[in-house]
C-alpha cells in the first residue's frame, strides 16, 4: 500500500489524505514490527554486503603472485591438488579491456597438467565462514553465485558446494556433492551463474573450534574417484582463468559490487595480516 501510494503521488495523480495516512501507518507498523531496523540494503539482507565473497575481484595478493601445487593464493582463495601438477598465478587485464565488465584489474590463472589417476585432482577453493548462514531450502534461502571464466581450449569446469561443520569435538561429517554443476569454458571470457539452495543444517553438530564453513569448489581436473562430486568431470589439463566472483542473496546475478581497494584489503587482513602475525586463512 505504501509503495503504491508514493508511486501515485509521484505520477501526479490525486491521492486522498486518508490513503496517504494509511500508507504512513503501514510504514510505521513495519518499522515497529522489525524493532526499528531496516531489513534490506540494496536488496541484500541487513548486515551483509551484496557480495559475500571477500576479494571476489582478486585485487589482494598478500602472499605473492605465483604459486606451485597446493597453496593459498589470492587472499581468501586456495588451490588444492593431488598428484596433478598445477601453477596458480596473478595475471593483469589490459587497461580498459572490454571482455569483462567493470574493468577488473586482475584475474587468476591455473595452468593444469593432465591428470592420469583416479585420485588425481586440481581445484580452487573459497571458504565462507559459518556454515549456518547459507543453508535451508525455499525461496528465502536462495543464493546466486556468478563469475567470469575462460580456458585456452574448450574445457569443463565443475562447481560443488561443501558444507563443512568444523573441527574439534564431534562435528558432523562434511556434506559433499551439493548443487554440482558443469560449466563449459571456451577461449572467450563468459559470465557463468548458478542459483542454488543448500540442505538445512538442522540436526547437525558444529565443531568446538568455530571453523565451520561453506566451501565453494571449482574443479578443473578430477579422476574417477570424484565422479559423484564433479558430474564425472574426468582428468583434464589446460589453462583455466577466472575473475570477478560474486555470491549474493536471491535468484538473480546482479552487477558486480565494487569495493574500494583499501576496504577490500582491510577485510582480507582479518584473516591474513603478516605485519600483525595473523596468518589464518
Image: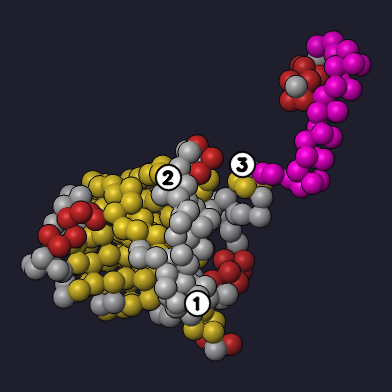
Q: Nearer the viewer, mark 1 or mark 3?
A: 1
Identify the residue under disc 3.
Answer: 43
Residue toward you, 103 or 55: 55
Tell me the distance, in whole angstroms, between the alpha carbons under discs 1 and 3. Answer: 33 Å
Give the class, few, some or many, for how many residues have Cα within 10 Å of label 1's Cα (few <14, many ≥20). Answer: few
Q: Residue at x 57, y 75 (%)?
A: 270
Identify the residue under disc 2.
Answer: 197
Q: Residue at x 14, y 68 (%)?
A: 119
Mark 2 element type: loop
Give the class, few, some or many, for how many residues have Cα within 10 Å of label 3's Cα (few <14, many ≥20). Answer: few
Q: Residue at x 60, y 46 (%)?
A: 44
Question: Magenta span has 279?
Answer: no
Q: Residue 225 shows which numbered tag?
A: none
Residue 179 coordinates in the image, percent (x, y): 33, 48
Q: Marks 1 and 3: CB-CB under 8 Å?
A: no
The tag earlier along the polypeptide, 1 or 3, is: 3
Tell me the distance, in whole angstroms, between the alpha carbons under discs 3 and 2. Answer: 18 Å
* Residue most extreme to the top: 14
Q: Is residue 161 above or below residue 210?
A: above
Image side of residue 160 versus residue 128, left or right:
left
Q: Is residue 62 above or below residue 94?
A: below
Q: Main secondary structure of the magenta part?
A: helix
Mark 1 element type: loop
Image side of residue 107 versus residue 207, left or right:
left
Identify the residue under disc 1.
Answer: 209
The tag earlier along the polypeptide, 3 or 2, is: 3
The tag earlier along the polypeptide, 1 or 2, is: 2
Residue 28 coordinates in the image, percent (x, y): 84, 35
Q: Which residues are magenta?
A: 13-40
Amino acid at each position: 500500500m505504501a509503495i503504491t501510494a508514493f508511486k501515485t503521488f509521484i505520477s501526479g495523480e490525486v491521492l486522498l489524505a486518508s490513503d496517504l495516512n494509511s500508507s504512513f501507518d503501514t510504514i510505521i507498523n513495519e518499522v515497529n514490527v522489525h524493532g526499528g531496523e531496516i531489513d534490506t540494503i540494496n536488496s541484500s539482507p541487513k548486515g551483509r554486503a551484496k557480495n559475500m565473497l571477500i576479494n571476489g575481484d582478486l585485487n589482494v595478493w598478500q602472499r605473492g603472485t605465483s604459486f606451485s601445487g597446493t597453496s593459498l593464493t589470492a587472499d581468501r582463495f586456495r588451490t588444492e591438488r593431488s598428484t596433478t601438477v598445477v601453477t596458480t598465478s596473478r595475471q593483469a587485464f589490459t587497461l580498459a579491456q572490454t571482455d569483462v565488465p567493470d574493468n577488473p584489474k586482475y584475474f587468476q590463472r591455473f595452468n593444469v597438467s593432465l591428470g592420469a589417476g583416479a585420485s588425481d585432482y586440481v581445484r580452487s577453493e573459497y571458504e565462507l565462514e559459518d556454515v549456518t548462514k547459507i543453508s535451508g531450502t525455499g525461496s528465502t534461502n536462495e543464493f546466486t553465485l556468478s563469475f567470469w571464466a575462460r580456458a585456452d581450449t574448450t574445457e569443463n569446469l565443475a562447481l560443488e558446494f561443501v558444507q563443512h561443520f568444523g573441527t574439534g569435538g564431534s562435528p558432523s561429517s562434511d556434506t559433499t556433492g551439493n548443487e554440482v554443476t558443469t560449466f563449459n569454458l571456451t577461449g572467450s571470457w563468459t559470465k557463468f551463474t548458478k542459483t542454488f539452495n543448500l540442505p538445512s543444517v538442522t540436526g547437525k553438530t558444529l565443531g568446538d573450534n568455530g571453523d565451520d564453513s561453506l566451501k565453494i569448489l571449482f574443479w578443473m581436473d578430477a579422476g574417477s574417484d570424484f565422479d559423484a562430486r564433479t558430474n564425472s568431470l574426468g582428468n583434464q589439463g589446460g589453462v583455466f582463468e577466472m575473475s570477478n566472483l560474486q555470491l549474493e542473496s536471491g535468484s538473480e546475478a546482479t552487477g558486480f559490487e565494487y569495493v574500494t581497494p583499501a576496504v577490500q584489503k582491510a577485510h582480507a587482513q582479518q584473516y591474513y595480516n603478516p605485519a600483525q602475525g595473523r596468518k589464518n586463512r
